[in-house]
Amino acid sequence: MTVLIAGGGIGGLTLALSLHQIGVPAKVFESVAELKPLGVGINVLPHAVRELIELGLMDKLNASGVRTRELAYFSKHGKPIWSEPRGLEAGYKWPQFSIHRGTLQQLLLDTAVERLGRENILTSHHLTGWTETANGVRADFIDRATGKAAAGSYDGAILIAADGIHSAAREKLYPNEGPPIWNGRILWRGVTPAKAFLTGRTMIMAGHEILKFVCYPISKEPDAAGNHLINWVAERHMPPTYQWRREDYNRAARLEEFLPWFESWQFDWLDVPGLIRNCPHAYEYPLVDRDPVSQWTFGKVTLMGDAAHPMYPIGSNGASQAILDARVITREILAHGPTQAALLAYEAERRPATTDLVLLNRKNGPEQVMQLVEERAPDGFEVVTDVLSQQELEDIAANYKRVAGFQVEALNAKPPIVSKDARARA
């Protein structure tokens, strides 16, 4: 019987492709009328890239993304704090990709349409509720643009809610939870054509907890002017008296509201104010998440991705964790069929792991090295080890990899989530 998936984002589409891979029919329902390649850049970590490669997407990823070579942290003065290789350069068997979120979603969408058929990827279908039936679950949808019922209801064996941080399913399950939690930090994000910096495949983070800048390339080849697409994020922790326009979760940015804080960040290897000033379209987002909940699975319905564990975009884990969710659900459906038992087994593995990650991201994850440097040497330093020991630097990086599940040796030795033998038997 068909698995119903509410949400056509990265997690939902990865799940649909994974279920198709094991011969389980799936149908995806997306609220918007048209899935467009929106958003800005993201990083997909090796443990998640591995799963996309298992789905036969390596060539498409190579054509669309940049193989991240290193991650480097800098002070607000542009002085190096810590750097580490990433992807293949770090010893993983799989690369890390920097890619436009919309490009990755479009890649997954095109593949899903090709493999599952357009009739199984339905737009203008916003989940409003569900009821359990003798054979599974019946999900109800409306066209949110018109408020009218969208082709009635659909029956399936189970319902997976992959409908994001504003999940309609989660709101039904936790009606008193309220909006996502804002911690006083705002992100301004954009993509700017600019010259390559450092290795040309470096992801950098500069600053500290109050004021931070992140950027990395998301296009492999330069344009006619020699520019690459550089994804950037400017972040500010606002004072307690600041009144943010809470009704807007994704609005056009006003450069005059944040550019002045970064005007002096002109390093010999990167022109931060230039990236901001030359951006064609920048957007403002609150830095929000939700408290971990004690249960995802209710009968034949469960949550996944940002509907289950929305987290701060720290450590490049949002999309990667949704991909891992999709693959674990698929493995458990192989073991138990599309049943509540499969959903409970998935939750038993993934909920504790992602809870730890949500909480660690609230403490800034591996980015805490920048804050420690700011606290100990706010006026700058000559050599970072005068401020932070090599052991402290290594311990912080290693601990985050452990919690997020992408330690090099452990991941390389780990079998695929959905084994080839199991796929062959399906």
Image: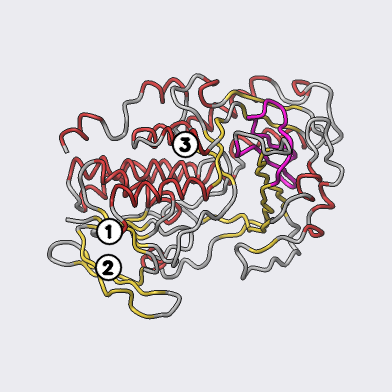
Is residue 342 placed above or below 398 in the rendered structure?
Answer: below
Sequence-first tag of 2 and 3: 3
Front one among 99 and 248? 99
Q: Nearer the viewer, residue 134 or 424?
A: 424
Disc number placed over residue 4 in the picture, else none:
1
Residue type marked 1: Leu
Which of the labelled discs sits on residue 139, or is there none? 2
Q: Residue at x 34, y 37 (%)?
A: 55
Residue 193 in magenta? Answer: yes
Vertical position of residue 238 compared to residue 397: above or below? below
Q: Quadrant of residue 30?
A: bottom left
126 relative position to 223: left or right: left
Q: Residue at x 24, y 42 (%)?
A: 332
- Residue lying at the far front of the rendered structure: 224
**Label 3 residue SS:** helix
Above or below: residue 88 compared with residue 119: above
Q: Quadrant of residue 41?
A: top right
Of the image marks 2 and 1, the number of the one nearer the N terminus: 1
Magenta residues span: 192-219
- Does the CB distance between marks 2 and 1 fall below 8 Å? yes
Q: Residues within 10 Å of mark 1 (few under 14, many from 20)?
A: many
Observer-nearest residue: 225 or 126? 225
The spot of residue 119 in percent (x, y) is: 28, 60
Tell me the CA gap for discs 3 and 1.
26 Å
The stretch drawn in magenta includes residue 379: no
- Circle 3 residue: 61
Would you say 196 lies left or right of 326 here?
right
Q: Residue at x 64, y 37 (%)?
A: 217
**Amino acid type indicated by mark 2:** Ala
Q: Position of residue 11 (x, y in %)?
A: 40, 49
The span from disc 2 to disc 3 (Cα, nearest Å) is 33 Å
